[in-house]
Image (cartoon, rainbow, N blue to C red):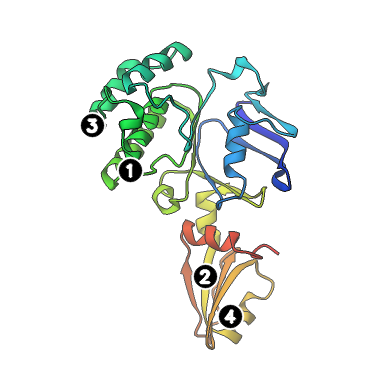
Amino acid sequence: MKAIEVKGVTKRYKDVLALDSVSFSFEFGKIYGLLGRNGAGKSTLINIIANRVFADKGEVFIDEIPAGENMAVHDKIFCMSETDLYDRDLKAAEHFKWTNRFYKDFDLDKALILSKKYGLDINKRFRALSKGYQSIFKLIIALSLPVPYIIFDEPVLGLDANHRELFYSLLLNEFESGERTFIIATHLIEEVSNIVEDVVLIDNGKIILKDSVENLLEKGYSVSGAASEVESYCAGRNVIGCDELGGLKIAYIMDEKAAPPKESNLEISALNLQKLFVKMTEKGALK
């Protein structure tokens, strides 16, 4: 099976249970959105998959190969990390050369072309780059590596609107030019909602949702109106959250859509991915 498979992974930091028996998979050939609030376990999960942190229990497999401390998966996966892991005194050009030594398929020519597109001065030392250009440098490294699985951890941190759009365009071009898997971990959910195919939602160290964006947007909706009418409509339905103001109420629902009774004054509205994420991760939303 071509996939990143996470099987029963648990990770604890002293009194904090960061991941709690997590099991799921990233299938090959898709663009995923990995979503989670701060402290949800997203970064820990990414670091375990990327072999930067070791799980207390469980295991990760990449194309059925055990990933833990296994050089056999080195050329299968790369993680662009939000954390700066590069030598701050080396120039961008020097980092490209070192990456070319560690990854045999690193496309140095592509890295130089992308640097020109982004206006990255490759003769600047990493520490001399702005936060935005440090992110751009890391994006260029990732986009120039033709490995099957690439994880982007907050990839557009510090980028302006034009540079963010360029990244999304380049990402889609890379995806269309050859079947690969891209995993985008981000809090800018609306920006990626038209790019990602599937969403994995992590909260309190557990995977609470794994579904296609198409299914989520089809099933997610809100109903608003008088509180008594809304409550009557919601009976027996999967309500993920509510907002109330005076005698009015809005209920957020993940279920098959059903028209309200003809005599009611209820209003049905579609939900976007951002609102679904917020309501599903609100305290107590899934209890």
Q: Report which residue position mark 2 lands on.
A: 222
| Number of numbered discs overlaid on the protein picture | 4
The amino acid pointed to by label 3 is: Gly
Q: Earlier in the sequence, mark 2 or mark 1?
A: 1
Q: Secondary structure under badge 1? A: loop
- Residue 253 placed where, x, y %? 58, 67
- Select label 2 or label 1 by which is in front: 1
Q: In the image, is residue 71 above or below residue 278?
A: above
Upstream in sequence: badge 4 or badge 2: 2
Between disc 3 and disc 2, the foreground one is 3
First in sequence: mark 3 or mark 1?
3
In the rendered structure, are the residues bearing label 4 and label 2 in contact, judged by CB atoms less than 8 Å apart? no
Q: In the rendered image of this protein, does residue 283 appear above or below residue 10?
A: below
Nearer to us of marks 1 and 4 is 1
| Disc on res. 119 | 3
Query: Is 206 placed left or right of 266 in the picture?
Result: right
Q: Residue at 36% x, 34% y: name it.
A: 134
User: Dot 4 lies on which element?
Assistant: helix
Q: Nearer the viewer, residue 256 or 170?
A: 170
**Contact between labelled residues 1 and 2, with CB atoms less than 8 Å apart:** no
User: CB of mark 3 within 8 Å of CB of mark 4?
Assistant: no
Question: Marks 1/4: CA distance?
Answer: 42 Å
Q: Which residue is mark 4?
A: 230
| Mark drawn on residue 159 | 1
Q: Nearer the viewer, mark 3 or mark 4?
A: 3
Q: On the rendered structure, is 183 left or right of 118?
A: right
Q: Earlier in the sequence, mark 1 or mark 4?
A: 1
Residue 215 visible in the current orientation: yes
The answer to whether residue 2 is above or below residue 238 is above
Above/below status of 150 relative to 278: above
